[in-house]
Amino acid sequence: MKPLFDTILLGALLVMLPVILGGCAGLAPGPPDAREALRGLADNAAHGLLEDPPWAPADPAAVTILLQPAEVDATLPITPDALNEALARGLLSQENSPHVLDWMPASMSRSSSEQWLLQARLSAEAPPLRLSDRVLQPYRLQFDLSRPGKERSHWQWQASGAVDLDALPATESTPAP
């Protein structure tokens, strides 16, 4: 009776083992989608910017950042609008963030002491790094903050890194495969 029981138990284990292993393989996280990759880049940039901002940290809610149209290197598959949207979301998601508007009026009032213009530039100045499973593009992200009509209020921040090109959103001009 014992050999029959051992045979049934062994057979059951052999049948269940692929099912268990297949279930574990299905739990692995998938690759990041385009929105997550761009959001990660923007969140890191927002954190760096707000770590030591040029305005008084006592009342960040009194500050408004107006996003100028971003400048994006043509070799990167990111539109300026997508970068601005990601930066606005990244800034607004930070603790003690100022107000952020992805809009700028045609003329600025010089009396708006707590308004800052943000110009973002994303450039790819180095060739892509080809790895066995992906292509990483080194980048430099630069922020120029200034106050309307006050040239002395100019402030810069920059960060460098590398981003997975396959995880970035395709631009509208990218042809479909």
Image: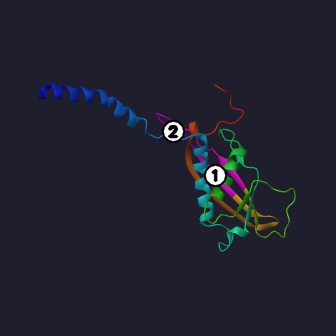
30 above or below 142? above
100 above or below 169? below
Identify the image quadrant of the N terminus.
top left
Question: Residue drawn 13% across and 26% down?
Answer: 3
Whether tag 2 and tag 1 are in contact, CB under 8 A, the answer is no
Residue 31 marker: 2
Relative horizontal placement of residue 125, taking residue 151 as reference (left or right): left
Relative horizontal placement of residue 173, taking residue 44 as reference (left or right): right
- Residue 34 in percent (x, y) is at 60, 40
66 above or below 13? below
Q: Element at badge 2?
A: loop
Q: Element at badge 1?
A: strand
In this orientation, which residue lies closer to the viewer: 141 or 33? 33
Is residue 161 covered in magenta?
Answer: no
Question: Residue drawn 87% across and 56% down?
Answer: 106
Question: Residue drawn 65% across and 63% down?
Answer: 97
In this orientation, which residue lies closer to the viewer: 102 or 109? 102
Circle nearer the viewer, 2 or 1: 2
Q: Which residues are magenta?
A: 119-143
- Residue 176 in percent (x, y) is at 66, 27
In this orientation, which residue lies closer to the viewer: 146 or 97? 97
Type of amino acid at the residue the image marks with label 2: Pro
Relative horizontal placement of residue 5, taking residue 112 as reference (left or right): left
Q: Residues within 10 Å of mark 1 (few under 14, many from 20)?
A: some
Badge 2 or badge 1: first in the primary sequence: 2
Residue 141 marker: 1
Which residue sits furthest front?
A: 1
Q: CA distance from mark 2 to mark 1?
A: 24 Å
Question: Residue drawn 64% across and 60% down?
Answer: 157
Type of amino acid at the residue the image marks with label 1: Leu
Is residue 123 covered in magenta?
Answer: yes
